[in-house]
Image (spheres, coloured by chain):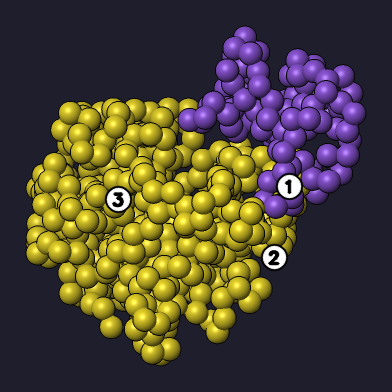
């Protein structure tokens, strides 16, 4: 079994009397979402607490001190030397800090919708720098990171906007969940934290497990992508399983709804497109930073901690807009990105990742061959000599919004039925203002 | 030049027969789906983008993220009168889109 990042899986979750003893702490603070310029939630720190405490972000144990943030910004490493791409900070306003009474050395009870949720063992309280400069330092600039950054980040980039919108102070320290929340349906069915996913992989005797990052309902191109990755990772035989891991967090208008993403992937296994339970659907709570190469490091960490041996990275992985080069992730995992302090690929540096990349280009449908074909990477053409058709997000959105059933070579009928199921629930096939409002009020947990 | 791609199944394709747009339809995915690419002059393209601030333009000049109500009204407008402008007036935001 592949070892967790940092060598030890974090599990900071307490239950029973030991947990309840923290519920009455008077030093307490209600967790609030980070709001964008229009007042809409763009991040909720509860998701980061869940991912830290259940070990998805191992070896990270809590919110970073200012020294640790500096180390991450300089060379993308925690203070213990292990590779980590993003500052993870718990930001508060001056009023919130004052009302909580928290100071270094305290146990601060964090409440979620008024109920005890986690304890933050306060190590440091510090002032964040100018948040615009902070956000630039997190993601880079064309001047400093010219090998992959194509244009300056701004409010149109959702990850940059998160850092830009942080409150002025930060509280650092280890976090421990003292009242584990229960997930709503259908999330509860797909909750597979690292300790559990490792048990599953071990019990099934899988040796090659390929992780698939998703924030989409799968079309057939995704399915072909996963199947090809199984062959690439497996060598002379197909790998054992695909671990689909959806990132569940703040949504944007026009995204697929989270419930349809999870159940859409599940429909591939239920429909028999993957046999024998070798396609496992799970999720991690994280408000995507869309950091492209940086995000790929975090994705590698999360899935290595879950027990995956390989990670698929395609064109435009965790990308939005044209801020990064479409193949920045491939560059990182083949040569490193020295301008971010990463001189070699993340799996080749000291205290780096153990998970191995499966770097893939694009897939498209060839109507003449009557099958999906591989397009390869930058500058490469399809394997056949015909004109091919790509399935883009905008094509799928157009087809669905016009009330058409996508052809089965584009989307499996079982997957389309899932889209329609949640369309009936939310009145729209994609994230709408109504969905955003409902999601942030309800979150994923009861 | 801006473009809008309208997608058609066999039923919608049949409704476009005999209109000036029929000749611009091409099959996709081996005939399981059809697409009609409308080319808008600059003024009309800008009008569409101003009308729907959430819409964007992709690298090939296609206008993306248009509301369903506009897409559907656009198709009906083409069938009935062969024009784009009327659809702009009838479209609204997409708080609800009826499922198929």
All told, the count of numbered labels is: 3
Quadrant in the rendering for residue B65 = top right
Look at mark 2 in the image and give the residue it sits on: A414
Which of label 1 and label 2 is nearer to you? 1
Quadrant in the rendering for residue A308 = bottom left
**Secondary element at tag 2:** helix
The answer to whether A90 appears left or right of A265 in the picture is left
Q: Which residue sits at x=47%, y=52%?
A: A382
* Marks 3 and 1, how far apart at CA: 33 Å
Camera-nearest residue between A92 and A418 = A418
Quadrant in the rendering for residue A49 = bottom left
Look at mark 3 in the image and give the residue it sits on: A329
**Secondary element at tag 1:** strand
* Marks 2 and 3, how far apart at CA: 32 Å
The answer to whether residue A229 is seen in the rendering is: yes
The circle drawn on residue A208 is none
> Which tint is chain A?
yellow
- Mark 2 or mark 3, which has the lower sequence index? 3
Is there one chain holding both mark 1 and mark 2? no
Mark 1 neighbour class, 10 Å CA radius: few under 14, some 14 to 19, many 20 or more = many
């Amino acid at each position: 079994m592949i070892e967790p990042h940092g060598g030890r899986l974090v599990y900071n979750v307490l239950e029973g009397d030991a947990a309840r003893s923290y519920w009455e702490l008077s030093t307490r603070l209600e967790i609030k979402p980070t709001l964008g310029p229009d007042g809409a939630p763009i991040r909720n720190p509860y998701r980061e607490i869940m991912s830290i405490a259940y070990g998805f972000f191992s070896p990270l144990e809590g919110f970073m001190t200012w020294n640790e943030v500096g180390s991450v910004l300089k060379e993308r490493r925690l203070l213990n030397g292990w590779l980590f791409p993003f500052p993870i900070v718990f930001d508060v306003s001056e009023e919130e800090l004052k009302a909580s009474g928290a100071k270094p050395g305290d146990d601060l009870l964090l409440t979620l919708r008024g109920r005890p949720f986690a304890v933050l063992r306060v190590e440091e309280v510090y002032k964040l720098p100018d948040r615009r400069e902070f956000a630039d330092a997190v993601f880079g600039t064309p001047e400093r990171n010219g090998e992959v950054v194509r244009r300056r980040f701004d409010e149109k980039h959702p990850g940059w906007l998160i850092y830009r919108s942080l409150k002025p102070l930060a509280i650092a320290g280890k976090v421990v969940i003292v009242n584990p929340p229960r997930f709503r349906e259908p999330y509860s069915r797909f909750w597979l934290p690292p300790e559990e996913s490792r048990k599953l992989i071990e019990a099934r005797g899988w040796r090659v497990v390929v992780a698939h990052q998703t924030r989409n309902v799968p079309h057939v191109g995704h399915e072909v992508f996963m199947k090809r990755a199984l062959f690439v990772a497996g060598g002379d035989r197909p790998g054992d399983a695909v671990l689909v891991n959806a990132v569940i967090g703040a949504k944007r208008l026009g995204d697929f709804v989270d419930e349809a993403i999870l159940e859409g992937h599940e429909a591939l296994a239920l429909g028999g497109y993957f046999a024998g339970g070798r396609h496992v659907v799970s999720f991690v709570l994280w408000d995507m930073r869309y950091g492209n190469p940086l995000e790929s490091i975090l994705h590698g960490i999360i899935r290595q901690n879950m027990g995956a041996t390989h990670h698929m990275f395609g064109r435009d992985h965790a990308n939005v807009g044209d801020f990064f080069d479409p193949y920045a992730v491939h560059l990182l995992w083949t040569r490193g990105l020295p301008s971010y302090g990463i001189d070699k690929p993340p799996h080749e540096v000291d205290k780096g990742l153990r998970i191995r990349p499966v770097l893939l280009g694009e897939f498209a449908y060839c109507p003449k061959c009557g099958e999906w074909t591989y397009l390869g990477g930058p500058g490469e053409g399809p394997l056949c000599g015909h004109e091919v058709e790509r399935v883009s997000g905008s094509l799928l959105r157009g087809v669905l919004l016009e009330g058409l059933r996508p052809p089965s070579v584009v989307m499996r009928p079982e997957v389309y039925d899932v889209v329609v199921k949640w369309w009936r629930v939310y009145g729209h096939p994609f994230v709408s203002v109504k969905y955003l409002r409902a999601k942030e009020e309800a979150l994923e947990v009861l | 030049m801006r473009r809008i791609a309208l997608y058609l199944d066999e039923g919608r394709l049949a409704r476009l027969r005999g209109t000036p747009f029929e000749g611009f339809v091409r099959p996709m995915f081996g005939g399981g789906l059809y697409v009609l690419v409308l080319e808008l002059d600059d003024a009309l393209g800008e009008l569409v983008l101003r009308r729907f601030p959430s819409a964007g333009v992709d690298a090939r000049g296609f206008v993306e993220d248009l509301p369903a109500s506009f897409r559907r009204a656009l198709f009906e407008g083409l069938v009935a009168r062969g024009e784009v402008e009327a659809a702009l007036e009838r479209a609204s935001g997409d708080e609800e889109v009826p499922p198929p």
